[in-house]
Amino acid sequence: MINEFYKEMTGKGSVIREFFTYATKKAAEIGAENIFNYSIGNPSVPVPQAFTDYMMELLQKEDPVKLHGYSPSLGLDSTRCAVAESLNRRFGMNYTKDEIFMTSAAAGAIAHALRCVTKEGDEVITFAPYFPEYVPYVTGCGAKLTVIPADTDTFQINFEEFEKALNPNVSAVLINTPNNPSGIVYSTETVKKLAAMLEEKQKAFGHDIYLITDEPYREIVFSGTDAPFVSKFYANSLCCYSFSKSLSLPGERIGYLAVNPACKDAKTIVLMSGQISRFTGHNCPPSIIQLAVEKVLDMTSDISVYEKNKEILYKALTDMGFSIVKPGGTFYMFPKSPIPDANEFCWTAAKELNLILVPGDSFLCPGHFRISYCVTTDMVERSLPAFEKLYKMYK
Amino acid sequence: MINEFYKEMTGKGSVIREFFTYATKKAAEIGAENIFNYSIGNPSVPVPQAFTDYMMELLQKEDPVKLHGYSPSLGLDSTRCAVAESLNRRFGMNYTKDEIFMTSAAAGAIAHALRCVTKEGDEVITFAPYFPEYVPYVTGCGAKLTVIPADTDTFQINFEEFEKALNPNVSAVLINTPNNPSGIVYSTETVKKLAAMLEEKQKAFGHDIYLITDEPYREIVFSGTDAPFVSKFYANSLCCYSFSKSLSLPGERIGYLAVNPACKDAKTIVLMSGQISRFTGHNCPPSIIQLAVEKVLDMTSDISVYEKNKEILYKALTDMGFSIVKPGGTFYMFPKSPIPDANEFCWTAAKELNLILVPGDSFLCPGHFRISYCVTTDMVERSLPAFEKLYKMYK
């Protein structure tokens, strides 16, 4: 009598986790310094000191009954206001707190956004390569996920395929820029073209199509990259954010949903999110974490190490002969596998060279592999001979 | 194209919130000291100092990258172990970490427990008076909630009505003891009878019936009360806990689901919970909060004030003539309204006497009202003349 649907899922492990588990075991055997673990997206630089200082101040000075007391289900008013103001200041928007809903990181934001703008039987479109958790987020709403194949030359949007896929059943489009796993940032040209196509289809189909933007890497953008704030270009946009990456707080599980004030239902969508939480058992993030994040909204961790690692890896790997679309942000790159079977390639790298990579199949983009370089620059440098050997094995 | 189901819900305010909002407005007009606000369940005593001290220690001494890094989706291993050990030590159980799932407070625990053991079309039984959020938790799984009317003489279980309601479609029974709003604790006799009836029906129907126990008030039990640990008495039991009340941490949103090791699917249910989170966007509680709670698992806030308030209120109100089943725990009591319409009664109390009570209709138990006495003893004492006047108005 336990639920068979969820029971069946417990058997299926994720490939990323398989590689991560292999790396952990191997590290125990031969020492972590002998493993080049590029498998996970856990930030490697500390949260800004101001966050820690303010946490301590709250703990020392605030009345604990007030500090740890119930917060409203949409989040603390002061935090929602501060998030709105930070977005307005940095991106020239005009959010108010009524368009902000504090969530349990990006997962909470996306799950709520999807439930707000889809119903049973709807279709949601996303673009490969994409974060595999989009599947349960979308199917959990009773909607169906359609994946547009990647434009592997640029990892911008494959508009030809996208236009073919758009149909009256589509209620939302879900994008991730800067992108995990490609590291590519959608250009202003891409975003404008996307917005224009959605506007046109809204008219043609006679209903709204919502653009859900998953953007936890928004602040991790490398110099010279054109990185527009997507919601500026499309009224019906729902921005899903997490502080996991920019503030190095993945374990503290805090993010938000910001609905574009230009969307006519923006305030309603935020109120609906509060209702949705009642069905799924979601709670807004802990009060103390909301308050502390509120103080560092315009800051990031020292993310310069990611750009440095990208520079080293991109130059060395392309010199070796790897084919890579140059990342514009995040801490990922997504080279082409020298053999079609990226899974085989990654297992060889792991077993022969202790180089832990993740096959692109997990992101619905076979023939590629992901390098997650939120690691020390020292590890990057020490790993280069292994990449060289790996490439030569397949040349 | 926004989801009509959730949209419609945004219009409907909760009655408790209406009273709370009225109290807040009135307090701004005439001063908080002139309002006797018994409307909400926000603990009034601070978290143990050991929690705060350990939070400070973590912030000062731990590597922030490690401290705030990703935790496994089921919760930190160390926290899950510590929760299991604390339950074993205090209640003579034999949990391991594999039967513990860390959740976003009781809401997260109950929502996951229900999804684990029900499927579309199943029936879940609960007992009035009950927490109104049970409705969305249950209907969110596609199941139907059946409510057994209260035994208003004792607020123990109305077994006659319960037995009539049990049918092969029932997959779970959801109880809340110590109870919000009645303050009553199910006795060993009640729990044994409940377990025996469920065992019998499992055999008769040829399938499991799960007992989901919502017990955030488990540690708030008054002297002389028989307060059994429910899971000891029934194998297929899922204990849903929150640290909101016992540790005065409601805003920090931390709790757990503990599945009885005697349940043959216990470990599977915990793994399923991890899968369910992927669909709803649930995340386990923040790492730092898990670690700090881990240190104070066997402690509570100084909850003696609740018992003191209970003593004063119970004696004074019964002396005045109110009919009350004596609470065994929590910080609630649930007197009979002197008139059948408790809603009218509570609005009169609010408007004429600045006495903020909550009608039992919200808990599917009309004709009663809830007093939430997690307040200062001073306020309790100052409020007694208002109760006296109120009673006389209806005598």
Image (cartoon, coloured by chain):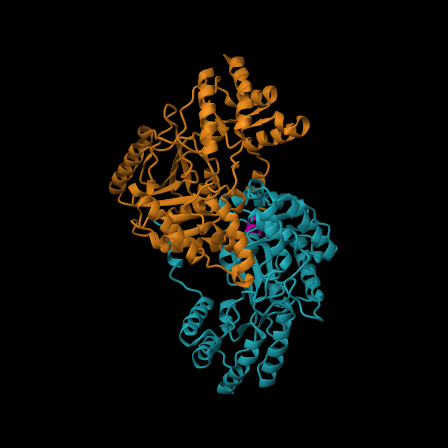
Chain colours: A cyan, B orange
Q: Is residue A114 magenta?
A: yes
Whole-percent x, y for residue B95 in the image: 33, 51
Whole-percent x, y for residue B112 in the image: 43, 48
Q: Main secondary structure of the magenta part?
A: helix
- Numbered label tally: 0
Q: Quadrant of residue A323?
A: bottom right
Front residue of B163 and B85: B85
Residue A265 in view here: no
Q: Is residue B327 magenta?
A: no
Front residue of B384 and B347: B384
Residue B258 in view here: yes
Task: Please say if B101 is above or below B132.
Answer: below
Range covered by the magenta-colored residues:
A112-116
Residue at the spot 70% in from the left edge and 71% down from the top edge: A223
Whole-percent x, y for residue B163 in the image: 30, 32
Residue farthest along the top direction in this orientation = B395
Front residue of B108 and B32: B32
Whole-percent x, y for residue B266 in the image: 33, 52
Task: Please say if B317 is above or below A8.
Answer: above
Residue at the spot 51% in from the left edge and 35% down from the top edge: B41
Left or right: A282, with A260 as reference point: left
Left or right: A199, with B332 as reference point: right
